[in-house]
Image (tube, helix red, strand yellow):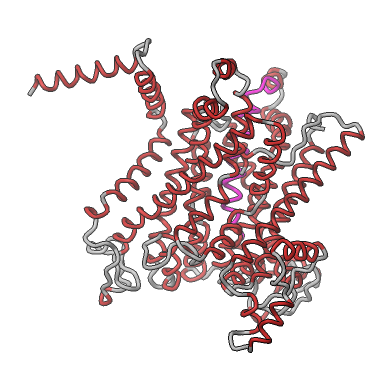
Amino acid sequence: MAHSGNPIAGTGTGSSPRLLIARAANLLFTLSLTFVGLTAITFIIGRVMPADPVLAIVGDRAPKEVYEAMYLKLGLDKPLIQQYLIYLVNVLQGDFGKSIMTTRLVLDDLIRFFPATFELASIATLAGIFIGVPMGVVAAVRQGRLTDHIVRVVGLIGYSVPIFWLGLMALLVFYARLEWLPGPGRIEVYYDGIVDPITGFILIDSAVQGEWEVFNNALSHLVLPAAMLATYALAYIARMTRSFMLDQLSQEYVITARVKGLSELAVIWRHAFRNVLVQLITIIGLTYASLLEGSVLTETVFAWPGIGQYITNSLFNADMNAVIGGTVVVGICFVGINMISDTLYRLVDPRVR
Amino acid sequence: MAEGVVTEAGGTARLRAWLLSDSPESTFHARCQRFYLGWRAFRTNPIAMIGLSIIATLVLAAVFAPLLTQGDGAEQHLSDRLLAPSAEHWFGTDELGRDIYERIVWGSRITLYIVGLVGVMVVPIGLLIGTVAGYVGGWVDTVLMRFTDIFLAFPRLILALAFVSALGPGIENAVLAIALTTWSPYARLARAETITIRNSEYIMAARLQGASAWRILYGHIMPLCLSSVIIRLTLDMAGIILTAAGLGFLGLGAQPPLPEWGAMISTGRQYILDQWWVAAVPGLAIFVVSLGFNLLGDGLRDVLDPKSGSAG
């Protein structure tokens, strides 16, 4: 993804009001086009599904009249394009329809399941940043030496390992054999429902309400799945940081700074790293977005009640409203995060402004 | 005997002189020379060589699977189920008493099949869309690139999941789904390359000679895009393998009894607490192969693209 160029980047370099408006319009256009594309493709997939949505609701023993009434009620007699437009209008109003599996509104389900994924991906990304960035910087500074090779190998391992398998192995070692950490799930059953879901993030909710026992339990459950996702984040961030730093360290201003007699720490962190920071924002945005979607497999392995597990479970139950809703929400987050990082990029880098 | 060695050495020396001569006599000669020089640079890169040997092992295992195993990995011996690794069963046996070593060897064919098929589908689509957009420009460029951006903005695994569930689980559909979610970066890459070369003088010359747009695209622009596309593909291979394994793990990829590594982990998951090898070995195989592709891709980039910042 990182080499793919930025789809949203504008071309103007000035910042006159007219250019700003043009850029905002361009951004809005791209956003709406992506949104329409995203919903259209998921919608078509939903309609191509071999499962019959009417049968899924009324059951296969329903009399013909009931079946046909439901068929009309779902609007399946209308042309596909009209069905899609109706769906699009509903989605824009936040109406994703009803989930067959949970019999609740899909939107309610998504609001319930999303925080778990968000919590997991956020902590994994933070861990990836705090470990990966220093690793990358150190590797670049000590290019070609042992530290550099270790960082490169660690990075490649994080890139190459199937995360779901690593999760299984980690459960085997740390839960089943060593018994250091709890098993799958977000929290132990007997702590379930003790804290009121204010934000949906168990760590924040339990801390705010002073339920430290719950907090500790939730934290210990979070360690393994977050570590698995962080492995990937760390590998990617360290690798890109190293490559960006190498670019900067060979620039003339670095030589100038050294000739001036600045300490090596100042040269690396205050001069070179500052320039890397700008590029890093994009990379971190990409990592974050891919963790939000990539948690599907990790959530399956760790029985984590997040949006990834929700989508997979719905898929196996042919619950298309839920699948489309989940996919659209993840897609919007994905696009949204990339746009935020693109905007941040412009704010931080005076050359792009 | 000694004479034979001398001629052989002489032959090698002559071959090397031919490969290194300053004035190639034919296009074929020039191509061989380029390849040889690339190989010489490649050979000095230990990381790339490790990657290459892993991939070579994979290919050899796939080709010679019948020679490397006694059965086809599908025979069940219910009396030998879930045996631990031993001299007789190197990697142990699974829940139906099938030898895991044999299944891993036969599974390498499936892995290569998936990777190869995705590559064959993704590269032409990406090259075509990217070069046409970059060469023609104007509204064609805008339309094609917006289309590409939509696919680029998609969450890959989830889209693949949705595709496979719509088309029905199975290895071909998994390949199709992965290809549909993978082609877009290639289009962007090819477009960027095309834009940098479309105004060069030799393209002008070809156009003056009356070459058609298609001829210029196919004969002059696409070959130049190929090296960066191939590097990108090698680096993507690991991701493709991991996605395919993930789909297999969820039960949406290759179906049992096919020895697909991801599906093997999925069944091994039930026995993870007591018979860990059933899930551990196929995962290790996936890991080693995708590591191999990553090492190879890294090395190829160092050799073919010296501008790249991450070249160490």
Relative vertical location of residue A179 with respect to residue B188 in this rendering, above or below: below
Q: Position of residue B310 (x, y in %)?
A: 56, 33
Give the x, y percent position of residue B80.
26, 73
Can residue A234 be found in the magenta stretch? yes
Q: Which residues are magenta?
A: A226-254
Q: Quadrant of the C terminus of chain A?
A: top right
* A215 in relation to B241, above or below: below
Q: Is residue A162 magenta?
A: no
Residue at image position (41%, 62%) is B280
Residue at the spot 76% in from the left edge and 45% down from the top edge: A30
Q: Is residue A121 left or right of residue B26?
A: right
Query: Is A202 placed left or right of A314 in the picture?
Result: right
User: Which quadrant of the view contains residue B38?
Assistant: top left
Magenta-colored segment: predominant secondary structure:
helix
Q: Relative to residue B9, is residue B185 depicted above or below? A: below
Question: Of all residues shown, which one is farthest toward the right?
Answer: A17
Q: In the image, residue A250 lies at what x, y percent?
A: 62, 24
The N terminus of chain A: image quadrant: top right
On screen, residue B185 above or below A313: above
B119 or B84, which lies in front?
B119
Q: Count all numbered tags in the image, as a single digit.
A: 0
Write down the quadrant of residue A69 in the picture: bottom right
- In the image, farthest residue toward the left: B1
Residue A247 image offset from top left, x and y in percent:
63, 28
